[in-house]
Image (cartoon, rainbow, N blue to C red):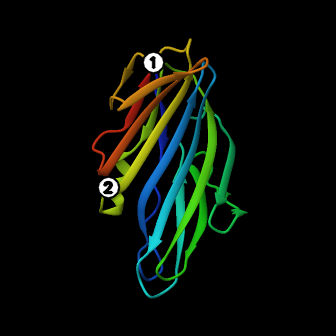
C-alpha cells in the first residue's frame, strides 16, 4: 500500500484582539531517496494601530512511522531563534508578536523521512486566513538522477545546475484549491 508524505502549513489566524495577515511565503523543498526537507519563509503583517500577539500552530503529518526531525523556527526580523513547543506528533506551536503597522518574517525548517512514492505540501490551509497570498514562491531541488513523475501544479520554470534539477513555481494572489504533490 502506497502512502503519501503529507506536509501542512496551518498557521492559526486567531489573535488576541486584532488579526495579523499571513500574506507571503517562499518555500524551498529538497527531495532525495531518504528525506523530504522543507525550508520556508513566512511573512506576517499587522495593519492595525495596536501590537498583536498570536499563538501559531504549525502542524506536521501525524503518521507515526514518518519521523519529523531537525525542526528550527527563527524570527528573521528579530534575528533570534524562537522556542517552540512540540504538540505530540501533530506539530509545533510558538508565539508571534507584531508591532502596530509592522511586518515580521519567520523561517521554519524541518525534514521528514520518506516511506512512499510521493510527497505532499498542504497549501489549502491558506483558506483559513480568508484571503489569498499576495505572493507564493516554491522551489524543488532534486538530484538529476531522481525522477519526478508527476506534479499537481506544473512548474513555471525548470533548469539544471550541476547535478541538480530545480523546479520553480511563482503564484500571485494565490488561494490554493489543491495541495502541492510531488510523485516520484
State the image coordinates of residue 126 (x, y, percent, origin top left): 36, 54
State the image coordinates of residue 142 (x, y, percent, origin top left): 55, 23
State the image coordinates of residue 100 (x, y, percent, origin top left): 49, 83
Disc 2 is placed on an element classified as helix
**Would residue 166 be found to the left or right of residue 128 on screen?**
right
Q: 10 Å neighbourhood of mark 1: few (<14), some, or many (≥20)? A: some
Q: CA distance from mark 1 to mark 2?
A: 28 Å
Is 142 drawn above or below residue 22 in the view shown? above
Going 35% across and 57% down the picture, which residue do you hit?
134
For the residues carrying marks 1 and 2, which lies nearer the camera in this image?
1
- For residue 170, which quarter of the picture? top left
State the image coordinates of residue 73 (x, y, percent, origin top left): 65, 55
Disc 1 is placed on an element classified as loop
Q: Nearer the viewer, residue 30 or 118?
A: 30
Going 54% across and 44% down the picture, which residue do you hit?
60
Residue 61 visible here:
no
Disc 2 designates what residue?
127
Residue 44 visible here:
yes
Going 27% across and 44% down the picture, which residue do you hit?
177
| Quarter of the rendering occupied by the N terminus | top left
**Would residue 12 be found to the left or right of residue 92 on screen?**
left
Q: Reading the chain from its start, which is encountered first: label 1 or label 2?
A: 2
Q: 10 Å neighbourhood of mark 2: few (<14), some, or many (≥20)? A: some
Q: Nearer the viewer, residue 65 or 46?
A: 46
Q: Nearer the viewer, residue 97 or 77?
A: 77
Q: State the residue lying farthest toward the top.
A: 145
Count how many numbered circles sit on residues in the image: 2
Is 48 drawn above or below residue 132 in the view shown? below
Is 17 drawn above or below residue 179 in the view shown? below
Q: State the residue lying farthest toward the bottom.
A: 49
Disc 1 designates what residue?
148
Amino acid at each position: 500500500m502506497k502512502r503519501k508524505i503529507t506536509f501542512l502549513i496551518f498557521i492559526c489566524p486567531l489573535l488576541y484582539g486584532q488579526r495579523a495577515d499571513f500574506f507571503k511565503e517562499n518555500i524551498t523543498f529538497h527531495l532525495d531517496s531518504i528525506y523530504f526537507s522543507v525550508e520556508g519563509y513566512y511573512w506576517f503583517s499587522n495593519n492595525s494601530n495596536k501590537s498583536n500577539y498570536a499563538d501559531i500552530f504549525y502542524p506536521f503529518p501525524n503518521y507515526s512511522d514518518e519521523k519529523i526531525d531537525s525542526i528550527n523556527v527563527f524570527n528573521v526580523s528579530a534575528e533570534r531563534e524562537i522556542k517552540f513547543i512540540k504538540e505530540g506528533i501533530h506539530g509545533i506551536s510558538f508565539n508571534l508578536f507584531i508591532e502596530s503597522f509592522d511586518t515580521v518574517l519567520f523561517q521554519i525548517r524541518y525534514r521528514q523521512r520518506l516511506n512512499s512514492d510521493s510527497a505532499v505540501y498542504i497549501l489549502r490551509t491558506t483558506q483559513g486566513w480568508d484571503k489569498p497570498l499576495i505572493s507564493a514562491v516554491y522551489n524543488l531541488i532534486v538530484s538529476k538522477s531522481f525522477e519526478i513523475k508527476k506534479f499537481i501544479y506544473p512548474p513555471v520554470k525548470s533548469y539544471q545546475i550541476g547535478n541538480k534539477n530545480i523546479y520553480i513555481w511563482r503564484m500571485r494572489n494565490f488561494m490554493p484549491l489543491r495541495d502541492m504533490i510531488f510523485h516520484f
